[in-house]
Amino acid sequence: MIILTAEGGNISLPFSWSQLLLGLLALAGVAAVIALTVLLIRLCKTVKKVNKLLGDNSAQLDETLKKLPTIATSADETMSNVKGITGSVNNVVTDVTELVDTFTTPEGAGGVVASVAGAVVSVVQILKELKDSK
């Protein structure tokens, strides 16, 4: 039995602490059952909506599933092409790098111009000598 003290005296309640805890536990159990019931009802509604969506779109889903192997094959071929293009680009980059290196070395562009100018001067001298000798 629970005895509470108030300003005017003692108040006696007709149940014990264990009975009070059991009552609260029973109320919590009822609340849990209600919450679980609501959750299950919502879950059933969601499953019904999903089933309806799948039923309404089954033809489109079947068509899409039939196309998946073709899409996967196309993706594989595309990746193979990308690998080939990447290899070609690597070769081009290597060639361009070598060409750039030719012009950036000490002999580089100046060396090329000097070599061409020297060759032109030599040809002109040879032609002049040939003309003078005639």
Image (cartoon, rainbow, N blue to C red):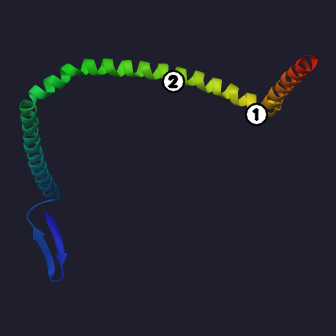
Please identify the quadrant where the C terminus is shown: top right
**Residue 105 shows in the view:** no
Secondary structure beneath label 2: helix
Q: Which residue is mark 2?
A: 86
Q: Amino acid at mark 2?
A: Thr
Q: Quadrant of residue 131?
A: top right
Residue 87 x/y as whole percent: 53, 20
Label 1 crowd (10 A; few <14 / some 14-19 / many >=20): few
Residue 36, image quadrant: top left
With 132 as the anchor, is 48 left or right in this view? left
Residue 1 x %, y %: 13, 63
Task: Note whether 18 is above or below 94 in the view shown.
Answer: below
Quarter residue 129 falls in? top right
> Which residue is identified by label 1?
104
Identity, as a three-letter code, of the amino acid under mark 1: Thr
Q: Residue at x 38, y 22 (%)?
A: 78
**Residue closest to the eye, 10 or 84:** 84
The answer to whether 128 appears left or right of 86 in the picture is: right
Q: Position of residue 50 (x, y in %)?
A: 11, 36
Write the residue at 24% across / 21% down.
68
Residue 86 against residue 110 in the figure, above or below: above
| Pick the front one: 70 or 101 | 101
- Mark 1: which secondary structure? helix
Count neighbours of disc 2 (C-alpha within 10 A) and say few if under 14, some if 14 to 19, many if 20 or more: few
What's the distance in space between the residues labelled 1 and 2, CA to CA?
Answer: 26 Å
1 or 2: tag closer to the N-terminus? 2
Q: Quick check: can you spot residue 20? A: yes
Query: Mark 1 or mark 2: which is in front?
Result: 1
